[in-house]
Image (tube, helix red, strand yellow):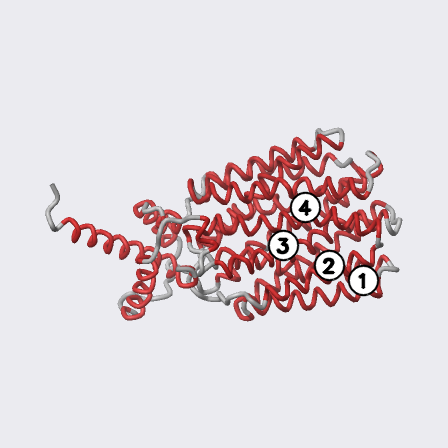
Amino acid sequence: MCSGDCGTTASNDAIDYRRRAANLLFRIENVPFSRWHTKARIVMGSATLFDAFDALSLAFVMPVLVGLWHLSPGGIGVLIAAGYLGQVLGALFFGWLAERVGRVPSATVTVGLMSVMSVACAFTGNFQMLFLCRFIQGIGVGGEVPVAATYINELSQAHGRGRFFILYELIFPIGLLLAAQLGAFLVPRFGWEYMFLVGGIPGIIVALLIMRLPESPRWLIGKGRLHEAERVIAEIEASTTARHLDPTKNASEIGRRVTTLEEGLRSQKKGNWRELFSGFYRGRTLVVWVLWASSYFIANGINNWLPSLYKTVYNMPLRESLHMASLSNVLSTGAVLVCALLVDRVGRRLWAVGCFVVGGALLTALGLYGTGNPWTVMVLASTAYAVLGSATVLLYLYTPEIYPTRIRAIGTGLATSWLRAASASAPTIVGIVLTRQGIATVFLMFAAVSVVGLIAATRMIETTNRALEEISP
């Protein structure tokens, strides 16, 4: 039998839980970035590097396969799309799984899958087998991206989160750059198979390193596993002697911030994907879906097709085509670095708006005046890709920010599935438009899509230097 005090006891237990959880969240926010954060960023970033490498590797073997397997423009588009079709499934499934079993186990499986299948791609001998291997590999690639982005975002504090996160995401364009440079070197000299081997074998080692990372303390708190979260946070605190707030001198500020976090926890409920379409989050969800789809339709449409365009449309030699295509990834790395240094000052929304305006203007100029010369295409298309590439990286920072911990991974996974859908459709659509309308129309199509992205960017909420729990109750 339960006495009349049971309700009071349960209420007191809930209050005590929220207070303990709020204090743990405050401690996460109060620890400056340290060597602990750097280690986690490097290990998870290594997976992102090979994710990028695997994503672009096919583009740099495609000019060889065109002649070897006598591929048509439509066949090229279908083969490029295979990986992105798998990525749609991976983003949805592993985003869901990361909410159930944790960020680290999910990331481990995704990296292992994409790396093993990269090795398998090297031993395919025909179109059908490569399509199948790229599709399965895409499931791992699609799952790794949202889970890794969620994990890194949850380790970050409000102040300087943009720089911390985008410096991590800088590894992605570096991976693209590495793939471009190695592709230009390896493929003409040793054969297309080596691209997949170089991308796959080190990734298996990275999967083992990820397995040893600590779980996200925010995810542990959301699951009620406060003792485990306490141990992880204690590790973070032990890695640095610096503190932002002195408990003896800043009692009022500490009290205010803990109270804010506790109020946010009071309204928390069990996570469910349907919450993404609730009144509070519906607008955010639709905006980021449009941003992911539009930006990646352009970025991956350009990046995956440029090597083949130089060779098939402009009849450039293979080695020169690959070197020309690699310029876009050199410029993109620089653009993302600039974004990392400025995004916490400029703000997420203004940066995204600027990218779509500048990128759209460059693509319009290219479509109207510049397609007659391959060198003009190289400069304008590569610059447009670099500008819009910094917006795509920004979305990995912004999307996890706008959702609470309970639906952060599934929300990010669903959003990134739109990038996969857009990236899967873009190569096929480019192949059709190129065959029927010509290359100028291809770039004007990209310019039109950038207008759609611009409209969505103006509807973003500003999240700069705000705690995750304050942005998303």
What residue do we see at 35% from left, 55% from top? Answer: 268
Quarter that holds the C terminus: bottom left
In terms of secondary structure, where does tag 3 sit?
Answer: helix
> For the residues marked 2 and 3, what is the alpha-carbon distance in whole angstroms?
12 Å
Q: Amino acid at mark 2?
A: Phe
Is label 1 in contact with label 4 (beta carbons under 8 Å)? no
In terms of secondary structure, where does tag 4 sit?
Answer: helix
Label 2: which residue? 446
Q: Could you tell whether 369 is left or right of 408 in the image?
A: right
Is label 2 in contact with label 1 (beta carbons under 8 Å)? yes
Label 3: which residue? 293
> For the residues marked 2 and 1, what is the alpha-carbon distance in whole angstroms?
9 Å
What residue do we see at 76% from left, 40% from top? Answer: 61
Q: Amino acid at mark 3?
A: Ala
- Give the quarter of the image for residue 90: top right
What residue do we see at 84% from left, 49% from top? Answer: 435
Label 1: which residue? 367
Q: Earlier in the sequence, mark 1 or mark 4?
A: 1
Is label 2 in contact with label 3 (beta carbons under 8 Å)? no
The correct choice, above or below, for 2 with respect to 163 in the image is above
> For the residues marked 3 and 4, what is the alpha-carbon distance in whole angstroms?
10 Å
Label 4: which residue? 424
Q: Nearer the viewer, residue 439 or 254?
A: 439
Q: Nearer the viewer, residue 50 or 464?
A: 464
Q: Position of residue 81 (x, y in %)?
A: 69, 43
